[in-house]
Image: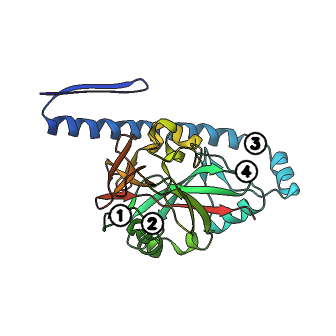
Amino acid sequence: MEELRIRAGKEEIKVSGSAETIERERNAFYQHIKELEKAEVKTKAEIIQKIRASVSWNERAKQAENMKPVVMRSCGELQATWEEIARAVKTGAEFKVGDYKTGNKTSDGQAFTMVVTDVTDDYVRFESSDCLGDEVCWNSSGSTESLAASDVMNYLNEKLWNVLPEDMKKVIDPVVRKYKDSAGNVMEYRTALFLPVASEVFDDDDCYGDKGLYKQLEYYKDRRHRMRSAAEGEDTDSWWLASVGSGSSTIACSVNGGGGADYWGASDANRVPVCFCIKKS
């Protein structure tokens, strides 16, 4: 007999039973939390819509006269094409962490949402709120020697790149990313799509060797944002990070279904999100 107790805000679950029962109830609880969050976003969106409706014609006219770049939004929802979003990024429109764009779909039919996870002086960063595609090995050889040459990076920039919407691919700017190898050496590589590293997702205590490489993003300080489903509408699942275990040439870092720091052998298979940047200039 096993026991499970989880608390998330005001929500709590206590259950006893077999391992299968515990796993089923854990997944159901995490899905319940996600549904509550979606309901909260919807409620806020309705409030914002009412506020927007009360804005005077005069204020709208002033906005048009000032020629400020505008991306229409409702409680963080970006209601624009990717071309319009990219133009707004490059002309100084305001974007906030948590802004999101729904209605995206891969060429093989998978629907997904992109969310803004970071805004800097140089770029706006977007990540899929859930995972895309199938499970993939971090590196089928079992080695973590080279992230740039790994199976997971090949999967991102070939397999997933090929199924992304064409209008989205046109606005993605390649960026230079850093990672630490198992010996602690800082390496750089240039890429269009990428994975977060452990130090962006977790605090210093859970970085597994990535400490100091990047700072934890505000977006990921909320555990719920670290929880990704296998695909939109499905149960949460483990997903890969672009980080390796310090001192080990075979261990790669991941995030488990509950949003916690984890690691697997590089030859194991996990899911991946899609991350990219649109530069401001």
Query: Tag 2, which secondary structure?
Result: loop
* Amino acid bearing label 2: Ser
Which callout, 1 or 4, points to the residue nearer the camera? 1
Q: How many marks?
A: 4
Query: Tag 4, which secondary structure?
Result: loop
Q: Residue at x 36, y 40 (%)?
A: 258
Residue 12 lies, in percent from the top left, at 34, 25
Pick the quarter of the image with the N terminus.
top left
Local crowd size for mark 2, using a 10 Å CA cut-off: few (<14), some (14–19), many (≥20): some
Left/right of residue 90 with respect to residue 147 in the rendered view: right
Q: Circles 1 and 4: CB distance less than 8 Å?
A: no
Q: Residue at x 63, y 40 (%)?
A: 48
* Colouring mode (rainbow / by chain / secondary structure / one colour): rainbow
Q: Circles 1 and 2: CB distance less than 8 Å?
A: yes
* Amino acid bearing label 1: Ser
Query: Tag 1, which secondary structure?
Result: loop
* Amino acid bearing label 4: Glu
Residue ID for mark 3: 55
Residue ID for mark 4: 94
* 253 in relation to 154, above or below: above
Residue ID for mark 1: 143
Q: Which of marks 4 and 1 precedes in the sequence?
A: 4
Q: Quadrant of residue 122?
A: bottom right
Residue ID for mark 2: 146
Which callout, 3 or 1, points to the residue nearer the camera? 1
Q: Which of marks 1 and 3 precedes in the sequence?
A: 3
